[in-house]
Image: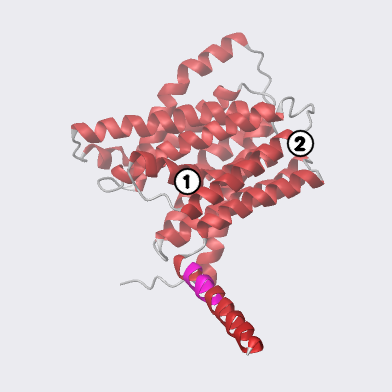
Amino acid sequence: MQNKDMNLFTVLILCAAMLIWASSFIALKVAMQDIGPLTVIFGRMILASLCFVFFIKKFLKIQFQKKDIKYIVLMAIFEPCLYFIFESYALLNTTAGQAGMITSMMPLITAVGAGVLLKELISRQLIVGSMVAVMGAIWLSLDAVSSQTAPNPMFGNFLEFLAMVCGAGYTIAIRHLSNSFSALFLTAAQSFIGAIFFLPFAIYEFNTMTFDPTSDALLSILYLGVVVTLGGYGLFNYAVSRTHASTAASYVNLIPVFTVILAYIFLNETLSTTQIYASFLILFGVFITQIPEGLKTKLVQSQYSVNFLRRKTREHKKK
């Protein structure tokens, strides 16, 4: 059995995957400056689909059940269909950095959704962390200032939040499908269904909007379709093969940090001091929900020991 202990190489692979996924916000923002938002998504889906054409013969041999088809359709409706509609219009209204910060709430939304729909345990720790993160997201949005590239940041952040709700629904659907299908097939299914779904939207935008795509916009779509879809997916799954899935999943919380840094470098976006505080509040809420059980137990035991010593000291002084 392969060693599942983390090492520097695995950490670097995970960080690279998160960096690629964070860069998708920058690429989307650049592409949508010259091309309709849903046309950008269609281009991304069609390019990703072409990457999976070589696996079609392998996919045709897969056996399906009726309930599997229902979950595959549900998965695709959540993501890429609704997810990318919300996210593309979110980035038309808010900055890439703020949208990236909202993504940190997805694990919390997923956990709450799993608790409601799958009857999984919702801990007090999750409730507290979720409330803290939501307050941070509201604070971040309220302090946002309109600009030429972010005309309505509060509305954009709300749309990004809806995208995260769809992402949570997708994750819950994947929990069922991953027992029967490979990640490669599920990613390909998303790409094929997404290309078909966004085709009529792209045709409508092509006939109703003025298109003057620059080389930057076209390269951004190529980057989204090939590098983000295959590179991010390939690196992450390779990392999962070298460590535990739960450990790898925790690195998703790096995406907001990387997005803010990339937005500053490539888009000249900045966060105000208040927005930085709000962002830290969001990350702190996420951190509360991610504290390992063993660490929580040690903290409780440590606090119990401190209180016990204090009580004994007071009793000794009284004597």
What label does residue 230 carry, if any? 1
**Amino acid of disc 2:** Asp
Residue lying farthest front? 319
Number of other residues with Cα within 10 Å of mark 1, as a class: few under 14, some 14 to 19, many 20 or more: some
Which type of secondary structure does the marked residue at label 2 adopt?
loop
Depth check: give the residue in front, 162 or 64.
162
Instruction: Examine the residues drawn in magenta and state their main secondary structure.
Output: helix
The quarter of the rendered structure image containing the C terminus is bottom right
What label does residue 143 carry, if any? 2
- Residue 56: x and y in percent read 30, 37
Q: Is residue 308 left or right of residue 61?
A: right
Up/down of 12 relative to 116, above or below? below
Magenta-span inclusion, residue 299: yes
Depth check: give the residue in front, 35 or 299.
299
Up/down of 35 relative to 50, above or below? above
Residue 46 seen: no
Residue depicted at 79% across the width and 32% down the height: 145
Q: Is residue 290 left or right of residue 191?
A: right
**Magenta residue span:** 296-302
- Residue 231: x and y in percent read 50, 49
Q: CA distance from mark 1 to mark 2?
A: 36 Å
